[in-house]
Amino acid sequence: MPETTPDSTSHQSSSAPLIELDHASQVFHVKGKDLPAVSDVSLSVGAGEVLCLVGESGSGKTTTARLAAGLAPPSSGSVRFEGTDLTEMTRAQRREYRRAVQYIHQDPYASLNPIRSVRSTLSVPLRRHGLAHSAAEVDQRVDELLTTVDLMPPESYSAKFPHQLSGGQRQRVSVARGLTLSPRLLIADESTSMLDVSIRVSLLNMLTKLRKEDGVGFIYITHDLALAKYFAWEGRTAVMYLGKIVEVGPTPQVINNPQHPYTKALLEAVPEPDPELARQKKAGGGLLSADIPSLSDLPSGCTFHPRCPLAEDRCREVIPLLRSAPEAPAQDVACMVVTDPQPAASAGTAAGGGGLP
Amino acid sequence: MSPETTTDPAPVLSARDLEVAYRTGKDTRVRALRGVSFDLYPDSSLALVGESGSGKTTLGLALLRLLPTLGEITGGSVAFTGEDGATKDVTAMTAQQLRRWRWSEAAMVFQGAQNAFNPVLTVGQQMADTLLDHAHGRMPRREVLERSAEALRSVRLEPRRVLGSYPHELSGGMKQRALIATGLLLRPRLLVLDEPTTALDILTQRTVIDLLAELRVEYRFAMIFISHDLALAAELADRVVTMYAGKVIETGTTKDIFTAPKHPYTSKLINAVPPVTGDLPELASIPGAPPSLATLPPGCAFAPRCELATDECREAEPELITLTQRPADMTHAAACIHHDQVHHERKVIARA
C-alpha cells in the first residue's frame, strides 16, 4: 500500500518495519462522551531503531504505546507488525508478535506481582513460550537475565519478593521481565522516571547496548526532553499534544532546532544542570497557560491555540496537518504559522492552506 | 579589615554535628545522620542533593523536629536566628515553643503534594486553621479570608476558585502551589521544601520553579530544598550541599559545585544528568550502590565505589576540608583527601 504519511520512514526497503501505526486513532467512551485520546497517529520503528514519544500527561503518548503493544485495538486506522495487520494475524503470527513486542510499565511498584519471587516472575513467560523446559534451564536463563540488568550476583536476587527490593531494583526486574522472551521491540514507558540519576543512566545505557548489539527496536516514552535527547539521539523524536503528533523528526534536529511552539515550550521547561544556562530559561516556558485542556472539550482548530504564543485567527478555525517545515526540512510540524507563514492581514478565509478538508 | 568580621552575614539556621538515629529493633538503631553541619544565610537558598537513602529527607525533617516516632535526634544542635536577632536551639525547644515556631518562623512543604492536604477539609479551612492556631483562635473571619486569599494570589491561584475547593478538585500543580501558599501564610523566615516538583509534569514543574524564584525575592525567606534532581538545584539554589550515607560530603556555591566539584561523588552525580542544551555528553552511572547505613564500610563511605580510593581512604573517614579562603557564605569544602585529583569534565559524544 503506498504511504502518504509524511512521518513514515522509507518503506520501500526490502522488509517492513517492526511496528507501524497507520493513521491510528483511539477514542474512549466515558460517561456518554467521546475522548479522542489518540488521533490519526502514524509512526514506525524498525530493528535497531529508537523512537521517542514526548509530551505532557494526557498527550496520548502512553495510549499510542499501548496501541503499538497490541494492548488495545485502535478505534480506526491500523497497527501492523512486520507488515501484517494485528487484526489479520494467524494464531502463529500473533504468538510471535506477543513474544517479540514487550512493554516495560511505568510504575515498578504496581506492575510486579507482590506474591511472586523474582525467579517466579521471570520464569512464567519462559515456560509459557516454551523457551525453557527444565528447572535447570529456567535457573540458567533467570541468572542470565539478572546479570544483563546488573542485579548481581543473581542468586542473591532470584528468591526475593518485590517488597524486599528498592525502587531501582524493581525497575530492573521489570526490565528483565521485558527481556525474558528475547524481544525485538521494547516499549519503555517512563521507565526511568522515579529513579536516582545514576540508576537511570545505567538503565538507559543498558537499553542502548541492547539496541546496538542485538538490534532491538525501542519506543521510549518520557516527558523529559533531556532524556529523549540522550536516549534517542540516533533515532527520532515525536512530540505529542492532546492525542496528535505535532512535531516529528530526527532527535538532534527536533531538540536543537525545534519548530513547533509546543516543542519549544517543552524544551524551555526542562531544568538545566548548568547554573549559567538555567538562568536564561524563559518563565513559564513561553506558554500562555500552564494547564492542558480536557480531551472531552477540545479547543477548535489547532488544539494548542489557547496556550500558544504564536496563535493567529486562522488557528482557531483550521486544524493544522503535519507538514515539512521550511526552516527545517528534516522535521514535520503541525503548525500553520510555521509551515505556511503569511502576513496577519491576509489571514482569513483564504488561510485554508494549512488544513485540508 | 578582615573579611571574616565585615562580610560574614549571620546565618538564619546553623546545624552543628547533627546526629539522627532510627530505631530498627528492640535494641538496635541505625545512624541516619552522622555529624551534619551547615549554615543557611538569610534570603539565600540551599539545595540538599544526593541519592535515595543519603539522609536528605531525614535532615529536612530533623531541622523542623518533624522526625517520625522511630527517629530521634541523638546529638548536635540546630540554631535558628529569628527576625529579632535572638538565637534559639531548635533541638531544645519544648512542644509549646515548637508549635509557635513552626509555620510562623519556619515552614515545611512536604514531599508528595498529592497527599499533604487533609482530603476532607477544603483548602480554605486548612489555611484558616493555620492562621487561627497562631492567633490563638482570635482573628476576625474577614482577616482570615483576606490573608488566605492574598497568599493564594501570590502563587498565581484564583482565591475564589481554590478556597472552597477540596484537594481532589485541584490539579497536582495547583495543589503544590496551594501548599506553598500555606507555607508562606505567616511569612516565615525559613521554608523547607522536600522534592517540591517531583510528581509534577514538566511544564507544571517549570511554573513552580519560576514561582519559587519570584516568591523568594518578594517575601525574602531563606529556602532549603531537597531534591534528587540536580538540574533543579542548578536552577534554584545559591548553595549546594551534597549528602552521602548520612554525611555532608561537599558544600559550596552552586557555581563551584557544578563547574568544579571537588568530591568524586558530586562530580559523578553531575555527570549522570543529561543536559538539554548544547553538545551531547557521555553519561556514566556510578558503579555499585549506596551502602546500607546499618553496615557502613570503615573509612570513607564512598570508597568502595570510588576509583580514586586508596588504603588511606579505607582507614579513616575524611572530614570536610575547606578549599578556598572566602567569606563564610562562599566557602567550598569537600570531604575527600584526594580532592586535588578530582578534575570534573564531561566527555562529549556528539556536537550540537
Image: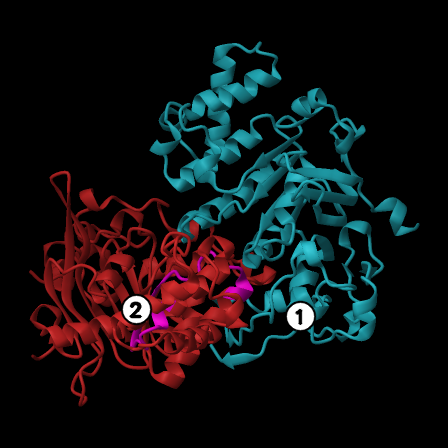
Q: Is residue B4 above or below residue B192?
A: below
- Residue at the disc numbered 1: B305
Q: What residue is rendered at 31% in x and 52% in y?
A: A308
- Residue at the disc numbered 2: A125
Q: Where is residue B336 in the image (x, y as percent from the top left)?
A: 78, 66
Q: Which chain carries label 1?
A: B
Q: Is any part of residue A151 visible from this angle?
A: no
Image-quadrant location for residue A198? bottom right
Task: Name the side, left or right, on which B41 lies relative to B167.
Answer: right
Q: Is residue B345 magenta?
A: no
Local secondary structure at mark 1 = helix
Amino acid tagged 2: Pro
The letter of the cyan chain is B
The reply to the same-chain question for discs 2 and 1 is no
The letter of the red chain is A
Amino acid tagged 1: Arg
